[in-house]
Every structure is written in structure tokens, then in C-alpha cells.
Image (cartoon, rainbow, N blue to C red):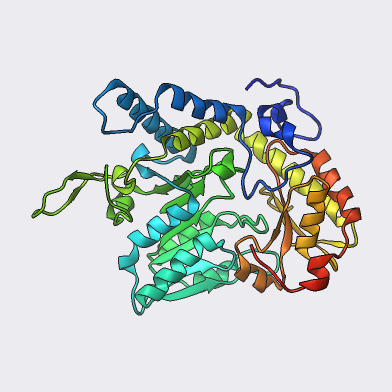
Amino acid sequence: MTHTAQESPATALPAGVRDDFPILTTLPGPYLDNAATAHKPRTVLDAITRYYTTANSNVGRGYHALGRRSTDVYEQARADVQEALGAAQPEEVVFTAGTTDAVNTVADGLRHLLGPGKAVLVSGMEHNSNLLPWRRLAEETGAQLRVAPVDARGRVDTEAFTALLGPEVPLVALSHVSNVLGTVNPVEQLVAAAHRHGALVVVDGAQAVPHRAVDVRALDADFYCFSAHKVYGPMGTGVLYGKRDLLDELRPPRVGGGTVKGVHATEPVRYVPVPARLEAGTPNVAGAVGLAAALRYLDGLGRDAVRAHDEQLVRYAVHRLSERPDVRVIGAPEEDPSGIVSFVVDGVHPYDVGGQLDEQGIAVRCGVHCASTFLDDLGLLGTVRASFAVYNTRADVDTLVGALDAVRPDVWTNEHPTTRFL
């Protein structure tokens, strides 16, 4: 990656960023679905290829040079993630298959905290990946699921949130950034409130890590989860950060190779320390390597520059979309931008909007964004979501807004006006 120091007036990032992403040359138009999956810079692709061509071997078990090299690369990736998150030690970083896997790992490991008379508190904006594991856990243990309300602008009601806490609530789960509206929760404040009432807090950081620096110790999060593929890394990889003493208490959700010191037919199983105890089987070493390369790429661009770029694009998109009388921006993404702008087009089903934009070469996400309960509370069938990455520009926003001129009610609006999925 080689960039000049020159800055365009339309971006806080150095010139040439788009050239770092080979896939962009193959696309017909703007890719604005980065909250679902971001594209990969060449440095990430090269790191994955380099691993497979120079270090490919199983980790931790092979008593040979290649096995040791693979283990070293894997553990260096862990150290890189630790540094990026501000964790106290590498052992607080557990590699997972993604945010969903990470949240499920915590939910399964903390099952013993819930039961009749207990409750788990979630926010009303949660993605299904940070809702369904807790809902199922509550149902299976006889505990209550409490939901902190979210206002019309997409913010968690902090007073209502605090009022729902108490000694009967040992667990809280909330998003750092809403995947629907891009709303940034006051995580540090909410975590502090939960801790005052003795609760542990699990934070879904999938939409935060790509757009802002995250310091887990400053947030005082007990657990923090995110996915590689949303932060310019490969699919199938994620991270569960946990305070070391809390990770030590988690029951391994899967058991198998690499998790034990020894197994005997008549003696108790002796598990190895974390993180290996929570990483049963052959790990996705290339995924961890790719994630570490993605985080280094962002550091190379400068986290402050990335955040300024996101803020400029979100505010510009809100401004341009608000010029159209037929468009309504949902929430207030311009107040603390985090890469997402959701909107509706009057009289047109979101799927018709998304399909017709696709016909013009523009990729957006449309629907309920795996958060149907949140959309229900907002009184919406769904939204059209434009989400930005470091390679997006104001020209992409202009293309999107101009393309809305051609959007018309079609089969979804006329024949399936209340149908929703995704």
C-alpha cells in the first residue's frame, strides 16, 4: 500500500485508497453495503496468500519447523488484535467464526448465571445475533428477557435502561453501534450503570470497529465481539475479547483437539488455559492473519482520518437525501456518524428501491437488517441502508441520490406491500 500525503477536499483520507481494493475495478457502480461486508485491500489478500504459501500447517501440535512457524504467525495475529483493542494481554483475545459465534460462546458459557427469578437485559436495537442467543438462554433457563426501549431517533433510553437493572439482572447485552441506523450508544455510560448493579456486559462491536478506535479497557466492557469481514478482513473469522478472569470462567462451548492437557478414561478432563480452551479444533489461521492485516491497514490510513472520512460522507449523504421530498432519513445518523444512513422512499417498498438501484449498478441493503423487532418499534416495514467504507466518495453519494429519480413502485409495492424478509 503506497499513498501520497495529498488529501482530496471530499475526503480526509490520502489519495489512492480506492486503488488498494482490486474488486472495485470489476464493479458497475458504487458499493454501499459495507455494513454487511466490506471489501478487502490488497494487503489483506496478500497476507492470506503469504500464509498459505509460506507457513501453512496446523498450530500448536506439530513438532516441526512449519508447525512452529504457523503457530508464531497465529499468535502474532492475536497480539495485533490485542493492541488494536487495547486489551491487557493477548490471552484476552479469542478467535471465533464471527460476532454471532462470539456472542453464542459467551451466552453458553454464562448459562449458570440465569434461572427463575433472574433476567438478562438487552437493548431494543439489537441485531438478531445479539438478541436470539439471549432470548433462547432466557427461555431455556426460565429467566426473563428485558428490553430497554429505543426512542424514535434510534437511541437507547438511558433512564429506562438503568431502571431495568437490579440485583436480579446478572447479564446485559447491547450494541456499540446500531447496524440499522448507525446510532452510537453511550457504551461507557451504560456499562458503568450495569456494573454499579453487579451485571456483566457483552458488547456487539461489529459496526463500531470499522469506523472508530475501540479501547475495551476504557469502555470497561466485560466482553466485546466483532467480525473480520466488516472491517476489511476475511469472512468466517471474528473476535471475542473478554477480561481474563471472566474468560477463565466460561464453559467451553465446544470441546476437542487443542483444548485439553490430557484425557483419561477414569479421571477428570484437564483443560488448558484460555484462549486455547475456547478454540477447539483446527483454527482459521489464515482468517486471523487476514484480520490482523486489515487492522494494520486501518492503522496505516490513520484511525482519526478514517473516522473523519466516515463523518463527512454520512453528513453529506444525509444532506443530499434530505433535499429530496420523497425521501425520509431514519434516525439522526449525522449527529455522531458511524458509516450508516438508512432511509425510506415514500410509496415505494424497500425491496423495489434496492432492486431498481441494483439495476443501475448500485449495491445497497434493503429490508429489516436482521433486526425486525427494532423496525417494528420504529413502525417501519424496512429501510434502504447505505453504508460506507474508506473507498467510498461523495461521487458515490451523488450517484445514489441521482439514481433515486428512476425508482418507481413495482412488484413488491403493488403485489406484496407488507412482505418482508432479511
**Quarter holding the N terminus?**
top right
Q: Is residue 323 visible?
A: no
Residue 257, relative to residue 60: is it above or below?
below
At 37% from the left and 37% from the top, the residue drawn is 90
Q: Picture coordinates of residue 115 (x, y %)?
A: 33, 75
Q: Is residue 262 left or right of residue 289?
A: left
At 68% from the left and 37% from the top, the residue drawn is 390
Nearer-the-camera pick, 347 or 389: 347
Nearer-the-camera pick, 292 or 61: 61
Q: Is residue 68 left or right of residue 78?
A: left
Nearer-the-camera pick, 116 or 215: 116
Q: Is residue 253 visible?
A: yes
Name the quadrant containing residue 305. top right
Residue 76, relative to residue 237: is it above or below?
above
**Quarter holding the C terminus?**
bottom right
Residue 81, relative to residue 167: is it above or below?
above
Q: Picture coordinates of residue 124 (x, y %)?
A: 58, 68
